[in-house]
Image (cartoon, helix red, strand yellow):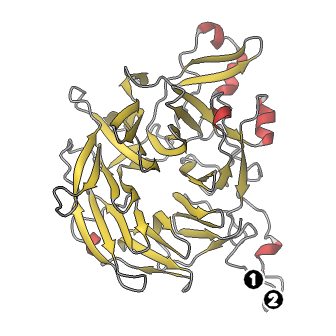
Amino acid sequence: MRRMVLLACVAATLAALATLAACATSDEEGASLNPGSDGGATLIDAPSPGELDGAPGPDASVPVWSACNDAGWCETELPDPNLTFIDVWPFVDRAFAVAQSDTLGTKVLEWTETAQAWSYIDDNSQNAYGQGQYAGKMYAPSENELYFTTAPGIVYHGTRDEPSAPFTWQSTRLPYEGPEYADRDPGRAWSLPAPTTFLRYAVALGVIGTSADDVYAWYGNRVFHRTSEDGGPPTWVSEFVTENPNGAANESFYIFNASPASSDEIWFAGGHGTTDAVKGYTGCPTLFRRTPSGTSTVLDFTYSRGTCSPKPGSLQPRIKRELPGFGMVEFPFQPVGWATGVTPVAPGAVMVTVQNELLWDYVDIGSNVALINHLGGISPPVPTQTPLIHSVVRVDGRLWFSGHGIVFSSEIKPDAWKSGLGIGTLASYEQAGVGQGALLDTTNVAMKGRYLNEPLYQVRGTSAKNLWVVGNRYALHKKTP
């Protein structure tokens, strides 16, 4: 896999320093690929006593496994074993999820604590011909109202009178008028950086909101706001478009994710760049901030020949490193890759993940900074060339991450991130020989004595005592702190 090199365009005097070589990293290079490592890995070599039921089976040498592991993560039984959960939206006593399957298409499910089971709640209209090609993000303002998205750019809205009643569904195709290309999908980007790497996808489709009366959807390069005009029924109105009318014909623009910080602040992350028939999409990250005064551009770049140069009016990402004999050195950094996630950490400040890798941006518009940070001390359960980090959310004053077979949480520490100290373990900071940034805590998601060699696409929670993480063939629930 082509590595994202942390030190780009460094002056020749700095390039001569051997210490700079230790700063280069990627989603694989920043993580130990030794399955036996315990530096954040989810692998366990033997069953934990906490995972065994109290009574042995007929053969005492054969363990009888509990549905929960020693960290409190419980595997929930799926109505179909081949479901891939894309997103989950939890409440205290129930949760909603959107999933997809080669045999069932797109499905919407509900979990209830009373039944301790998932059930389908859709009417299957999303799998009509030409619909339900793949699922996007979902949003639930309440236990009786739910939105989910499917390609090509369709938003489904479900309501019910009370929790025991069935949902009534309505669907609307977003009034997308963006560029249509015969060789690419406006709602999904793909990338194959090198022949030896796995194909990567990023879906540019979803819905989010701050309340039942303030809901947004995105598809391709456009953001829509559900708006009622002159007292009429709500409709999806195109509110923001990211594009370059004078750009090259093979240039694509996407919105990949969104996250509200409050009712007055919503962030949208994405990317733009060129699409190649062999390598797929290669581009630069973008970040936009919506407030009552409008939508402003925070990160945007001009892509040319594998480099990203900041456009006028957008922030210039920078990197800080402590170099022996030089002290703390700060210099410009040219990021390459799409922005796959955005998570508010303070008013006007967000964490931006880039291409699901271990490098990320701390962006603070109040301080006018975009600092490159690193996520250290994390090991995948097995060697992998797939992306490590799939989602980041804020729950109870901490950040929660999900990735390929891994789940962990972190402190929120903006002061350290302004210095580029990132997130890591005490061991990783000691090994790097730098100051200490935000500390992370790992949690074991190995189930029934085996690690999960599966992507966990989304983690969400209402509190530290009600967390969900979902992915390929798994929906895990944690109710212990």
Camera-nearest residue between 429 and 65: 429
Q: Quadrant of the C terminus?
A: bottom right
- Count of picture labels: 2
Secondary structure under the numbered disc 2 in the rendered image:
loop
The answer to whether residue 434 is left or right of residue 270 is: right
| Residue hosting label 1 | 64
Secondary structure under the numbered disc 1 in the rendered image:
loop
Q: Is residue 201 visible?
A: no
Residue 155 in percent (x, y) is at 29, 62
User: Callout 2: 10 Å neighbours few (<14), some, many (20+)?
Assistant: few
Q: Are marks 1 and 2 in contact (CB under 8 Å)?
A: yes
Residue 408 in percent (x, y) is at 66, 54
Residue drawn at point x = 64 percent, y = 55 percent: 406
Camera-nearest residue between 204 and 37: 204
The answer to whether residue 66 is left or right of residue 391 is: right
| Residue hosting label 2 | 55
Residue drawn at point x = 39 percent, y = 82 percent: 162
Q: CA distance from mark 1 to mark 2?
A: 8 Å
Camera-nearest residue between 347 and 308: 347
Camera-nearest residue between 56 and 173: 173
